[in-house]
Amino acid sequence: MMEKDINITDAEWRIMRVIWTLDSATSRELIDILGESMDWKPATIKTLLRRLSDKGIVKTKKDGNKFIYTATMDESDTIDLASKKFFNQVCAKKVGSAIAYLIDNSELTQADVDKIQTSLNAKEPVEEIECNCIPDGCNC
Ligand SMILES: [Zn+2]
């Protein structure tokens, strides 16, 4: 998997979730679905699609007089990258608490719990984590 820096806004995630669900979508389909569920105007959806295409997250194929949009990255890789990006933005010492918070506040199936348990069992803890906040500015 190519390591790219992904930067997807909340609105763009909405579009991507539809594209991932349908595998590919025309702008018409996206306008029908998101115009309805999000009350977005066609122009808004087209702008979002252009941005996603500029970012290389969707690719466009022309089919007759319509455009078909497909994702260039699969959904789970994108979620992994976005999670990693988020955790890179918080103090290294607070990542553990953030993960515990996510677990406490997420609906999880037995299969999810088993997967997390397996990851935890295999995890090699480190002795100490260095705070990466501004020097002297934090009390982590
Ligand atoms: Zn810190």
Image (tube, rainbow, N blue to C red):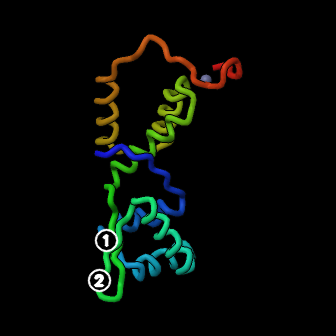
Q: Which of 102 and 113 is in front in this view?
A: 102
- Where residue 62 sits, quadrant-wise, is bottom left
Q: What percent of the width, then of the height, locates residue 67?
A: 36, 79
Judge from the rendering whether residue 14 lies leftward or rightward of residue 140; answer left or right: left
Residue reaching furthest to the bottom: 65
Relative to 111, say whether 39 is above or below: below
Kind of residue at badge 1: Ser
Find numbered disc 2 in the image and state the secondary structure of the residue it sits on: strand
Q: What percent of the width, then of the height, locates residue 103?
A: 45, 37
The answer to whether residue 26 is seen in the rendering is: yes
Q: Which of 33 and 69 is in front in this view?
A: 69
Residue at mark 1: 24
Label 1 or label 2, whichever lies nearer to me, is 2
- In the picture, the quarter occupied by the C terminus is top right
Relative to 91, say whether 46 is above or below: below
Q: Nearer the viewer, residue 101 or 23?
A: 23
- Where residue 54 sits, quadrant-wise, is bottom left
- Rendered residue at 32%/70% (across/down): 22
- Rendered residue at 29%/42% (across/down): 111
- Rendered residue at 35%/67% (across/down): 59
Q: From the Cβ of disc 2, is ligand 1 less than 8 Å away?
A: no
Residue reaching furthest to the right: 137
In the rendered structure, find residue 82 and report the number of the disc placed on it.
Answer: none
In the rendered structure, find residue 63 and report the number of the disc placed on it.
Answer: 2
Q: Ligand 1 falls in which quarter? A: top right
Kind of residue at badge 2: Asp
Instruction: Using a 10 Å C-alpha cutoff, classify the residue at mark 2 as few (fewer than 14 neighbours), some (14 to 19) or many (20 or more).
Output: few
- Rendered residue at 45%/50% (across/down): 6
Find numbered disc 1 in the image and state the secondary structure of the residue it sits on: strand
Judge from the rendering whether residue 138 lies leftward or rightward of residue 74; answer left or right: right
